[in-house]
Amino acid sequence: MSSDKIKDVKAAGEAVSESAREEIEAVKAHLERLLSQHVVPALGRAGDKAGVVAEQAVANAKELADHTKHDLAKRARGQTSWVSIAISGVVGFILGRLSR
């Protein structure tokens, strides 16, 4: 092979290599633009929504715990009052029987 052909092949290889680098840089720039314009804002919105949902879940759990606490307190008070009435009745009956 002559030295001219080798130089031509080398120049063609460098041209192809430079063209490939430019195309890769263009794709890289396009990908960065796509990420910054679409993906990053979407992730930010998803994070915000997740925060709001988490806050709502915590608020709902607190509300449910409060309702459960109040319901249990009502039930305990109701049972306590019936138990006290029953104990008073039994004590009264026993004292009445003993006093005769």
Image: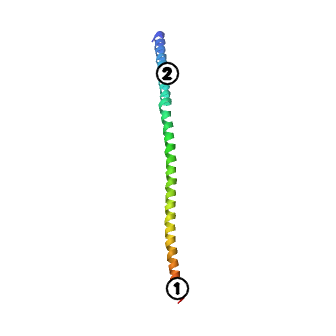
Colour scheme used in the picture? rainbow
Residue kind at label 2, given as amino acid type: Arg
Relative depth, front residue between 94 and 52: 94
Query: Residue 43: which numbered mark, if any?
Result: none
Measuring 50% from the left and 75% from the top, which residue is drawn there?
85
Instruction: Name which residue lies at 49% across and 51% down.
Output: 60
Specify few, some or many for label 1: CA neighbours under 10 Å numbering under 14, 14-19, or 20 or more.
few
- Which one is in front in this view, the residue at disc 1 or the one at disc 2? 1
Q: Which residue is mark 2?
A: 21
Q: How many marks?
A: 2
Can you give x and y, in whole percent of width and height, for residue 83 in the image? 50, 74
Mark found first going from the N terminus, 1 or 2: 2
- Badge 2 crowding class, 10 Å Cα cut-off, few under 14, some 14 to 19, many 20 or more, is few
Tell me, for residue 96, which label it has, or none.
Answer: 1
Q: Residue at x 49, y 68 (%)?
A: 78
Q: Amino acid at mark 1?
A: Gly
Q: Quadrant of the N terminus?
A: top left
Which residue occupies the extreme bottom position in the image? Answer: 100
SS for dot 1: helix
Residue 87: x and y in percent read 52, 77
- The spot of residue 35 in percent (x, y) is 49, 30
The answer to which of 61 and 43 lies nearer the viewer is 61
Q: Position of residue 55 (x, y in %)?
A: 52, 47
Foreground: 82 or 30? 82
Tag 1 and tag 2, C-beta contact below 8 Å? no
Please tell me whether mark 2 sits on a helix, a strand or a loop.
Answer: helix
- Up/down of 95 relative to 86, above or below: below
Q: Residue at x 51, y 40 (%)?
A: 48
Above or below: residue 20 compared with residue 43? above
- Alpha carbon separation for disc pair 1 and 2: 107 Å
